[in-house]
């Protein structure tokens, strides 16, 4: 267990001992209730310093009168256990009197920076932070102190104070840590109910959307801020305090995005205030140049990890008929006359890249898997100003025929549809979204299995997952799409609803041969698809032979 020290003079004795042995001292200031974000700070400290000191002190001076000081989570025993596992040497856990002795009168504040963004809404907060941080720095005189980028304004404020005072300490910022659902880890997330937590993930999503907007060419900071706020409000946050595109070192709001910026958001979900931020680097802003495109672009989703394939090979690289699945789908798109192709690759994209390069397609990355809507959204930087059609195909449905893609595309154009998508009847529709049509056989809606009553469950027609969209309404819908589930995944089926409610023309086109849309998710699927492919090839070959025979006979006549 790390040594727990409650008094400053004892702490100083420990530090003196370490110094005598030539050790470097690192400080990680915390308010306890530790999570993986704090532990990343401790690990960063462990990597650089010989003596790792973590302070645990819920600092009353940084809480406003109506804030959550009384209910702020505290559990020193749990914190110490966690710290032990992560290589902490000393836990400094003073009480309030130790830090603020009776008669304490001093203020420390960083002009300007303390009054902007969170400081404007939490008067006195940053003065409380700088005061306690200065006291901790004075107690230890560490070589390095570690602060999370999650509290980005705090990091900037502390850096400024240290610089102004000439304090001989290095301040290291450590990237924030997110939960699987994208939520930036925070001690305050324990306040959230499951429903609130789902809404809270929209902070991250709004930042991701802002990044995509900028990557797509948007340079007006005000527009990015407004769209970020709209997404937060639409996702159900209780109140947005701010969304700001700022200079990363001065925190001044920028008007035009032409160099590195940081985007910061603060919003309330119920009674919990949450903050989040994201860095946008100038290089990535400048790099994405959009090709001038016309007609139809195919976006092929190929990022699936394929864990159930029990292989190191990315799923779409498994072969059907001697060719990787994704190459089969690319071939089908080209047969349909779609030459402009973007493949959405996953985090193991390096294993697919040589093939994709050879096949001459563009590639975008989807580093985290958040559903089909999220996958397609990754192509936005390349399609932001594209006014044509976007054909969405799955890289793991290798049996799709060029003819079927062509049929969707020509119907889409002929009927001036906003969306045309393929449906098919399957013997067992369990688990799929069912297609509901009106008495004129027109598409009405998709009902997911979980929402289906027995009547709907009896429907055998399902969404086959092949779509053609008008690009502009597609990306408008995707950039504003709500993720109202805890995983924060968003799907193209939700876009259908949105586009329909906005007056878009949606047509669901039946495909007779359901095997064309069979997806490969595991080894068994792969076998089934290979068998069908082999049978199909055999049939096609014998048909060809037969036709050739007839032709030859005709020619002889
Ligand atoms: O980030 C925190 O947990 C606190 O603001 C800090 C830096 C420990 C000061 O109380």
Image (spheres, rainbow, N blue to C red):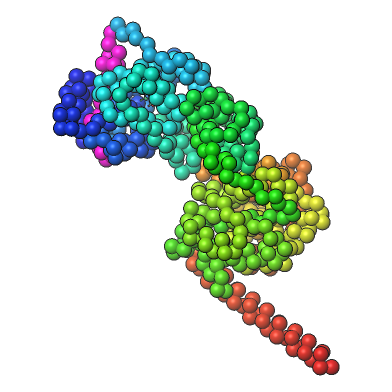
Quarter location, residue 243:
top right
Does residue 428 show up?
Answer: no
Count of numbered marks: 0
Q: Is residue 136 magenta?
A: no
Q: Is residue 362 left or right of residue 192?
A: right
Residue 185 in percent (x, y) is at: 43, 35
User: Where, quadrant-wise, is the N terminus in this rendering?
Assistant: top left
The relative height of residue 383 versus residue 423 in the rendered view (above or below) is above
Q: Residue at x 79, y 91 (%)?
A: 553
Does residue 297 show up?
Answer: yes
Q: Give, as a single range, the part of the protein colored magenta.
A: 84-102
Q: Residue at x 16, y 23 (%)?
A: 13
Residue 92 in percent (x, y) is at: 25, 26
Residue 472 in percent (x, y) is at: 71, 44
Residue 78 in percent (x, y) is at: 29, 34
Q: Residue at x 41, y 15 (%)?
A: 109
The relative height of residue 158 versus residue 537 in the rendered view (above or below) is above
Q: Is residue 397 left or right of residue 513?
A: left
* In front of the other: 212 or 168: 168
Quarter location, residue 129:
top left
Residue furthest bottom in the image: 556
User: Where, quadrant-wise, is the C terminus in this rendering?
Assistant: bottom right
Q: Is residue 92 magenta?
A: yes
Residue furthest right in the image: 557
- Ligand 1: image quarter: top left
Q: Residue at x 75, y 63 (%)?
A: 407
């Amino acid at each position: 267990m790390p040594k727990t020290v409650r008094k400053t003079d004892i702490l100083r004795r420990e530090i003196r001992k370490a110094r005598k042995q030539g050790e470097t001292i690192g400080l990680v200031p915390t308010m306890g209730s530790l999570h993986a974000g704090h532990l990343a700070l401790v690990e960063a400290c462990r990597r650089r310093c010989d003596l790792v000191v973590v302070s645990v002190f819920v600092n009353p001076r940084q809480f406003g009168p109506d804030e959550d000081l009384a209910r702020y989570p505290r559990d020193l025993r749990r914190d110490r256990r966690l710290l032990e596992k992560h290589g902490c040497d000393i836990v400094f856990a003073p009480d309030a009197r130790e830090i603020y002795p009776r008669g304490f009168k001093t203020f420390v504040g960083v002009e300007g920076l303390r009054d902007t963004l969170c400081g404007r809404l939490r008067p006195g907060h940053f003065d409380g932070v700088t005061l306690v941080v200065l006291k901790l720095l004075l107690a230890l005189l560490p070589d390095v102190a570690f602060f999370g980028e999650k509290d980005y304004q705090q990091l900037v404020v502390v850096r400024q104070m240290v610089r102004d005072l000439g304090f001989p300490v290095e301040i290291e910022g450590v990237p924030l840590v997110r939960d699987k659902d994208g939520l930036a880890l925070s001690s305050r997330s324990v306040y959230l109910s499951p429903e609130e937590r789902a809404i809270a993930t929209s902070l991250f999503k709004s930042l991701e959307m802002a990044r995509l907007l900028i990557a797509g060419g948007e340079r007006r900071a005000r527009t990015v801020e407004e769209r970020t706020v709209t997404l937060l409000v639409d996702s159900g946050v209780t109140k947005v305090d701010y969304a700001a595109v700022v200079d990363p070192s001065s925190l001044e709001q920028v008007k035009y995005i032409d160099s590195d910026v940081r985007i910061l958001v603060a919003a309330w979900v119920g009674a919990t205030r949450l903050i989040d931020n994201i860095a946008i680097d100038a290089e990535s802003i400048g790099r994405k140049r959009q090709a001038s495109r016309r007609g139809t672009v195919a976006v092929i989703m190929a990022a699936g990890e394929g864990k159930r394939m029990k292989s190191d090979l990315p799923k779409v690289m498994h072969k059907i008929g001697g060719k990787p699945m994704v190459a089969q789908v690319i071939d089908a798109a080209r047969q349909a006359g779609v030459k402009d192709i973007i493949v959405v690759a996953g985090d193991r994209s390096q294993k697919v890249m040589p093939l994709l390069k050879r096949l001459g397609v563009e590639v975008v990355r989807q580093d985290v898997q958040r559903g089909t809507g999220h996958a397609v959204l990754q192509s936005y930087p390349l399609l932001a100003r594209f006014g044509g059609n976007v054909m969405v195909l799955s890289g793991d449905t290798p049996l799709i025929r060029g003819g079927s893609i062509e049929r969707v595309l020509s119907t889409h154009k002929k009927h001036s549809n906003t969306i045309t998508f393929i449906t098919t009847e399957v013997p067992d529709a369990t688990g799929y979204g069912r297609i509901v049509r009106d008495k004129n056989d027109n598409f009405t809606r998709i009902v997911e299995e979980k929402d289906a009553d027995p009547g709907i469950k009896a429907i055998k027609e399902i969404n086959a997952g092949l779509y053609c969209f008008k690009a502009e309404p597609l990306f408008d819908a995707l950039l504003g799409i709500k993720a109202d589930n805890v995983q924060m995944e968003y799907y193209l089926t939700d876009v259908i609803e949105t586009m329909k409610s906005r007056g878009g023309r949606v047509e669901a086109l039946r495909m007779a041969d359901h095997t064309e849309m069979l997806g490969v998710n595991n080894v068994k699927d792969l076998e089934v698809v290979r068998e069908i492919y082999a049978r199909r090839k055999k049939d096609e070959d014998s048909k060809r032979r037969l036709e050739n025979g007839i032709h030859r006979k005709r020619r002889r006549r």
